[in-house]
Amino acid sequence: MNREVPFSSKRMLLTLTLCACAVILLQNHELSQRLSFPLTLGAMAAGLAVCFLFFIPSVLLKSRHNTDALTLLRSRAKPVRALTAAICGASFLYIAVYFLLPYTEMFCKKYYPDASPCLIAFLLLGCCVYAAVKGVNVITRFGIFLFVLAMTTNLLLFGGCVSSLDFQNGGAFLSGKPQDFLQDALYFATPCFIAALFACLCGSAKQFRVRHVTIALLMTGVKYALVLFFIVYAVGAYAARQEYRTFVLSRVAHFGSFSGIESFYMALSTMSVFMILSLLLCGVTKSVGKPGSLPLTAALTGGIFVLHWLAEQFPFIKECFTCPPVLIGFSFLTAVVLPAVLLIQKRRQHA
Amino acid sequence: MYNSLLEITKDLQETFDNSADLTVRTLILQSPERRKAAIITLEGMVDKEGLAQAAINPLMAYRFGAETPAQMVDTILYTVLASSDVTAFEGKEQLLTFISSGFAVITVDGAAKMIAVGAQGFPFRGVSEPESEVVQRGSREGFTEPLRVNMSLIRRRLKSPDLVFEQVTVGEKSRTQLMLCYLRSAASPKLVKELRERLAACDLETVLAAGYLSEYLEDPHTSRLFSGVGISERPDTVCGKLTEGRVAVIADGTPAVMLVPHLFVEEFQGVDDYSNRTYYAAFIRTLKYLSFMVSVFLPALYTAFAQFHPEYFPTWILIKTASSLSQTPLPVTLEVLLITFVYEIMKEAGLRIPKSLGHAVSIVGALVIGESAVTAGIISSSTLMVVATAAICSYVTSPLYPPVTMLRFLLVIVAGVLGLWGIVLCTALVLISMCSKTSLGVPYLSSLSPFSLRTMRDVFVRASWKKLGKHTIKVQNFAETEEIK
């Protein structure tokens, strides 16, 4: 099967948005406890602006040379390729564990208290191997179904909370401190990992444009804002004492006697994490120059599992793997430094 | 190459091992040398009366001049025979193919060339309405077993010179004749070429049904859960598909015609959709998609909810389900599996036993397995109702029955072990598998994923004929690579 089949850029856009939504689903618990709604919106705008900047080098590479960083590196000397593969591999493995950890934690705390996080991670990663071997094109096709699920879940989530809206609720959230701004902005900049993925995988997308990235980030921003709005005004002070506030929101949502939206939320978060991990695995195999290789994908998945297990066993490792600045640093290396260096080299060659 | 009549007769008798149905009728022609000729047939394969009128009587009556055997063959071919279906040929290979296909072969002593006369007269089932694709409005004609009859059913509906029938023979022993049927102006030449190559690669000894070949027509290294080859017994359906650029493979001896490329959304399209009003067609399509979802997911969701997430049941259902389940000895997963398994057994028995006994199976199934088992407290009524609903829904999209059944079993097992999360994970895997599947290079989930708004006019809803008739969307346009476009 041809794994390098080019795919529609709109599908890539959809995939990026869904990846960003997954971040919201999992990361919401990390926000400052003394949340101020207006300040948080400001932090969100700042975070997403940083994300946008991360996209610029690879968008330029795509629009000017119709390629991605990894495809361009194929013709370089072996040590350069090895170094790049090491950077991309380390970044993507870190990002994979970064998302797997909060997912398994949320899963075991909120859904199955008896389940072992490692078992959940093992099963999920096993499924990701299958998807990663099928390639990016197939995963973006899967994204279309995920998009339908995301739309349904969002409609149920927000629609089900409308009846609970109480604008007196927001009092607890309107006294935030400006020093939390930076911390919150860092969390909202987490979607920059998508720029790292984009830098490695956009080569196969057709005619990608800046407006696609803008729309993706705007959609993410709207989703963030809606989630925050409903958390503040529908869940209120109760949410301030809770972690995984989006989960709480899904539990609160109801249509008369019909409740249980958290099952949709669980399905969406599971499938989103599944898609992110699969795309990350695709990115690593592509950086090594063996896209779709089953042994390599299985070995990498084994690596992610071991890292996850270590993080579960040792709290200091877990802290390292759930640190947004490190994630942003790795993303910066892959999404900005790598394509920027290649762009400069290309320009010199042409000059 | 044969030189004498005796040689041919001897060789044929050896080849067929003196088979009782091999008939060699020797004639002495009215020529100065009183040259011998023979008509070779297989008993039961030819229409004797037709053969006598078309070949034997004219041969006996004709007065030949002083001609060489080769000239006599030409005279017979162009002057004597009163049949429209005559072919001259040489060699044993073709001789065997013609005889086996019901032709009468005329051979003249001393001539290498032989003549095949189309006088097939074997018994076959007449054209009737296919039981598996019954329609309310539309043609009642369905394909039958002989290839030529099926070809005529298509030709009658598509009177275009663009319609091509291309003959291919497969099966070393069965020598089954196939016809690749396509519209030259609609089908992609690359697609037809690819199909020819795949059929040429078929190394089967016997091909007795369409199913033998469908695996050879599927794309390699692609998921086999869903079929990438469509089957239809209706000439109107096949003609509709041909206009969209598909290729039909008609095999002699089977009324099931294979169609490639085949897409998932086609399983939900019926002939009646195109005769009914658009709003009703849309309603029926939606019903079919919902039934498909219910038949796959309902037993698994019920298992997961009953075993892991009872809070998802509305209170009044929860009370009834809990009281019903508490009276049965088996865990809910085993119960669902058991009833589904028993249902499959009953379905198989119902299909295989004589029709006269079918009622007995229905009574045993409904009374003994259903009512008695619930009354005895072996199974719960809610479980029985869930499995029955899923079973009925699975017949709404009958071509998808095999994958739906397998998925239902798989999901129930997964739901029993991992709950709702297992269903989600399993669904993700199945979706990935479906997204990766292609049928002759065309993504199996085309229209849905890759999504195309233009083609959605015939997916969940059926647009009016004024819109549908304007631009026929060719199936090869769905392909994401240039390989088959």
Image: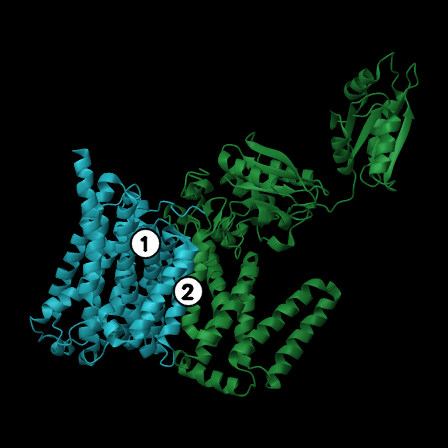
Q: Position of residue B191 (x, y in %)?
A: 50, 38
Tell me the amino acid under the disc marked 1.
Gly
Q: Residue furthest left?
A: A178
Question: Left or right: where does residue A204 sit relative to residue B304?
Answer: left
Q: Name the residue nearer the viewer: A351 or B445.
A: A351
Quarter of the image for residue A327 reads bottom left
State how far apart marks 2 and 1 are (Cα).
Answer: 17 Å
Instruction: Tell me the chain of label 1.
Output: A
Q: Residue furthest top?
A: B66
- In the rendered view of the protein, which quadrant contains the C terminus of chain A? top left
Q: Are marks 2 and 1 on the same chain?
A: yes
Per the image, the residue denoted by label 2 is A126
Tell me the amino acid under the disc marked 2.
Gly
Per the image, the residue denoted by label 1 is A283
Q: Residue furthest front?
A: A79
Q: What chain is the cyan one?
A: A
| N-term mark: 2 or 1 | 2
Instruction: Tell me the chain of label 2.
Output: A
Q: Position of residue A333 (x, y in %)?
A: 20, 55
- Drawing shade for chain B: green
